[in-house]
Image (cartoon, coloured by chain):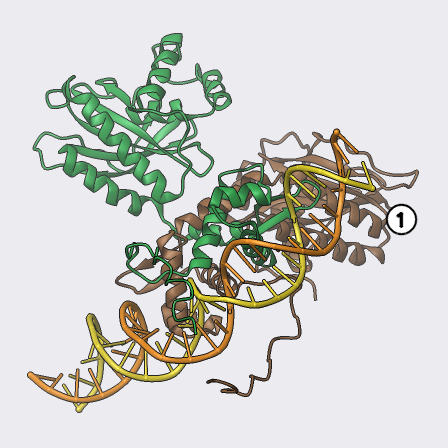
Chain colours: A green, B brown, C yellow, D orange
Amino acid sequence: MTTSTKTKPPVKKKPSSERSPQVQSLSRALVILEKLSEHDGGLSLTELAHLCELPTSTTHRLLTTLENKRFVRFNRGSNLWSVGVQSFVVGNAFARSRNFVPMAKIFMRHLMDKAGETVNLATQDHEEIVYLAQVECKEMMRAFVRPGLRAPMHCSAVGKAIMAAMPEVERTRMFNIQGVGNDTRSNIYTPDFMNTLDAVRECGYALDDEEQSVGMRCVASVIYDENGGPLAAVSISGPTARITDKRIPVLGKLVNQTCRDITESFGGRPSENVILP
Amino acid sequence: MTTSTKTKPPVKKKPSSERSPQVQSLSRALVILEKLSEHDGGLSLTELAHLCELPTSTTHRLLTTLENKRFVRFNRGSNLWSVGVQSFVVGNAFARSRNFVPMAKIFMRHLMDKAGETVNLATQDHEEIVYLAQVECKEMMRAFVRPGLRAPMHCSAVGKAIMAAMPEVERTRMFNIQGVGNDTRSNIYTPDFMNTLDAVRECGYALDDEEQSVGMRCVASVIYDENGGPLAAVSISGPTARITDKRIPVLGKLVNQTCRDITESFGGRPSENVILP
DNA sequence: AAGGGCTTTCCACGATACGGAAGCCTGTGT
DNA sequence: ACACAGGCTTCCGTATCGTGGAAAGCCCTT
């Protein structure tokens, strides 16, 4: 019986890829969910099966199981599958349980180690930015920012990074509000400032060259929320003597990478305005 | 051998419970995700296995598979499992793909059929409410509301329903703002009004008795967003002659049920202030 | 009517998920 | 210190359950 029926199939079992035992059907179903979430318009069975490299019958069986529990939905008529309510309901539990600032601080600490400079976290509040947290470096000369401190958007690196990441409409709304501001230099939002923001989007970080405080330079990048909008920004700040022109691109790259990491671990949607080679 | 090893087990296959073929391991994994999402604090392996009525080894195997794909996360140290980033990322695809108003209108149409009266959808915008959509009934005498129309919160049923569902802080903030309003009757937010809102929470619907427009009565209930806050409200409106005192509780129950249905299919978090017997 | 492209169902096979039990940690009580 | 308890993690033989090819439906278009 079956002495050599199939010559013992060539054992294409992967070279013990994963550490823990994995449930094939579940892994496959999760891939299906991921693919669906990457295609907002929905996917047909065959498209989906192709993307996941699975037979259609298997894909279909997994989909119906997911559908029974409302994790996916099927649009009869267009014959398209998409992500279902229950996925959203479950996902929101993550949104509730995460608390942003402590999580961000872990990444900020690493950044401080690598950059050797103080790292700040700030977010937008109306037409200003508010500092949320700081991880101080060990240098004697360093910038202090008490959490809760406010600053105008246009003259801080974090503010520029956030403004650059705003949707167009939001940004122009802010431009219109400006003028009632308490800043003496009139008409802050010049065409020149617009170009600055374009540059920020292109290179992935914003610069504050002693604008907020004499002798202080900051390099900042932005953290995206789940809709691809700006959620907060991280900056590296230090005295002009240490934040040299040559060092700025290096620090920019560092702070940008940190923000990408935070965005990912937070469940944000990185903007498609990419950024850095 | 094994000719009759187990006398062919008594085929305890369930009486064809489900229509489509179901993948056991996946179904179980989805139950795990649901249970995790209902316990924001996280769950230990054994607690979870208990809740899902599964052996711990099976639960553990499914969890590690889910963890590899970041759908759950494990807190080493507290030994607690909770929902992971990837669940959130996938769930957000649902948030993007849903468009609220068309979906709500399907339910509103059903409500209009059952109630025989015009049904409205409205949401909050700053200190006012804005009407988003209307499903008109066939009566000659009926209320017209053009989408985009605004009304004060305190004298519309939808406004009261939304205010009643607000978190306490938000509501008191609104009370403080009031006074700069253009309404002549001063001090609208009296203790009496507060009691009204308490009543709304208790019975599950709000009433506008000719306050917004003479001869018109409205009964409204609220749709919750994913955080359990008010997202929008649905009202039934009609002439006082048809919306009789006796009919109000009936209509209230109907509009409340519709709002529950919309909340569910939208992925909202029904408030735990429950409502109706 | 026939033909393609798709979804859905069926079914025999055997790979794969199952779960009991044994190992392994970590913290607790004596 | 030592043993014990109560979890978490791994192991492994069994047969259940998932698998995928094939065939059956189900539209549309030709």
Q: Is residue A93 above or below residue A117?
A: below
Does residue A36 appear in this view?
Answer: no
Residue B78 percent coordinates (x, y)? 29, 64
> SS of the residue at dot 1?
loop
Callout 1 amino acid = Arg
Q: Nearer the viewer, residue A184 or A174?
A: A174
In-front residue for pair A129/A42? A42
Q: Residue A222: horizontal and vertical position, in percent? A: 34, 30
> Looking at the rendering, in which quadrant would you find the N terminus of chain A?
bottom left
- Residue A176 pos. (x, y %): 49, 16
Quarter placement of the C terminus of chain A: top left
List x then y, in percent, for residue B7. Answer: 55, 88
What subunit carries mark 1? Answer: B
Look at the picture and state if B21 lies above or below A200.
below
Residue name at image x 21 percent, y 34 percent: A119
Residue position for label 1: B242
Q: Is residue A274 visible?
A: yes
Query: Left of B94 or right of it: where is A11?
Result: left
Residue B258 drawn above or below residue C16: above
